Amino acid sequence: MTPTSPTSPSAAFEELYGHAPEGVWVAPGRVNLIGEHTDYNDGFVLPIALPQAVRAYARRRADGVLRLASTRVPGQVVELDVAGLAPGGVQGWAAYPAAVVWTLREAGHGIGGADVLLDSDVPGGAGLSSSAALECAVAITYNDLYELGLEAAELALIAQRAENDFVGVPCGIMDQMASMACTAGTALHLDTRDLSARYVPLDLAGSGLTLLVLDTRVQHDLADGAYAALRAGCERAAALLGLPALRDLAAADLPAALDRLPAELVPLVRHVVTENGRVEQTMRELEQHGPATLGPILTAGHASLRDDYRTSCPETDLAVAVAVAAGALGARMTGGGFGGSVIALTRTADADAVAKAVTEAFLAEGWAEPHVYRAVPSAGARRES
Ligand code: ADP
Ligand code: MG
């Protein structure tokens, strides 16, 4: 018996577990328009949720056993004792859902077991936040199965803590808040210090625009220490400057602050401060002119990631350069970096040509063909049935 042998995930659930699911909960992946590596500096981000999402088919169990399966991992059912969950105790993909259950329990919520089958069309390791989508799908599932009554922001914090403390990736709050709290047709302006949210309408189609997502298929591994080192560098810089976080460094004070820092921290701080500025600039543009004028801000954001933060890679740099040369209004890597996806804002009439140019450039390099999606601002996590 495997999770993928029957036709629908619901039927697969029944075949795996011997009973029907109690419900289906869905949580989307995301792309971040601008505001990269700002969330663990108490700064600003501007993500949209994608139509691609993780669905959790689930039924509550009374015996404290958590059974986990994924249509992406055929033939495997991971069986865990909820009371015995501990960081380091679950390896591989099952660590993500188990982490959420552990975190809920650690936070004092009276939860127990469940049968869960995950089904997803968010590509993993592509910078589109399949991990947060998975965590948030499990978090809302448990919120309903055990009638916890938690709000979106509380569930996002649970999911982030799960990834930080159980999986071991010291991510900020953007991905989980995007997956939980985005709404269709808008971008979410989030102040990651207090989680205050503003929703800005983003009518791409009505503006004659397309937001391409070009998955370079270079899989990143954020658990490998590079991300943690960047975060630690930012925290050290804030401490040296006597600030609670780099968010508290005003753009006007940046030159003087850079003079006081060791050379290796200068580009990190410059990126974070200018990137927060680009989020605010993007908001002003969106409110005054709509999305058509955002291109140069996106491309400037990529240059900052490439030259200062050094989280881009040859594949993302080439995708951005070729997209812009082929007529994109602007382009940048999105997500944590070291591979993953590039977003390119194009006039809709130019979208196919831009995607084709990037694809041809990759093939000419002997690289795998990028996967191309069109991002539509979509709804956040919710119960589906
Ligand atoms: P990203 O969040 O950018 O997609 P991450 O490395 O943070 O990349 O998370 C990817 C990991 O999440 C995968 O390696 C896998 O362990 C887990 N994952 C994502 N989607 C699924 C799925 N549908 N089924 C099982 N595991 C998944
Ligand atoms: Mg992730």
Image: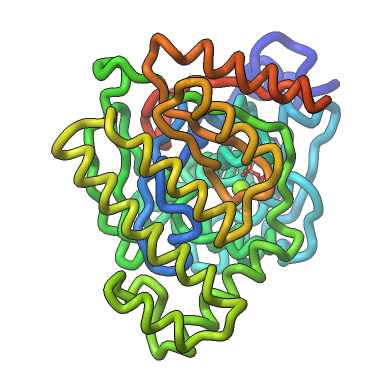
Residue 239, position in %: x, y?
A: 47, 87
Q: How many marks?
A: 0
Q: Quadrant of residue 133?
A: top right
Query: Where on the image, by quarter, is ligand 1?
Result: top right
**What's the residue at 61%, 68% (across, down)?**
230
Q: Is residue 27 visible?
A: no
Residue that appears at 50% across and 55% down: 304
Spot the residue most to the left: 288
Can residue 45 be seen from the camera position used here? Answer: yes
Looking at the image, residue 295 sits to the left or right of residue 56; the answer is left
For the C terminus, give its image quadrant.
top left
Q: Where in the figure is residue 260, as x and y percent of width and height?
A: 46, 88
In the rendered image, the quadrant that contains the N terminus is top right
- Please determine whether, in this image, residue 325 is positioned above or below residue 47: above
Give residue 187's quadrant in the image: top left
Q: Position of residue 190 (x, y in %)?
A: 32, 53
Q: How is the image coloured?
A: rainbow
Location of residue 375 in the rendering, given as x and y in whole percent from the top left corner: 45, 25
Above or below, comparing residue 331 to residue 302 in the picture? above
Looking at the image, which residue is at 39% across and 37% down?
Answer: 48
* Residue nearer the viewer, 216 or 138: 216
Residue at the (39%, 66%) spot, across then down: 273
Nearest the viewer among 224 and 90 is 224
Q: Left or right: 24 with respect to 252?
A: right
Q: Looking at the picture, does residue 277 appear above or below residue 332?
A: below
350 and 129: which is toward the camera: 350
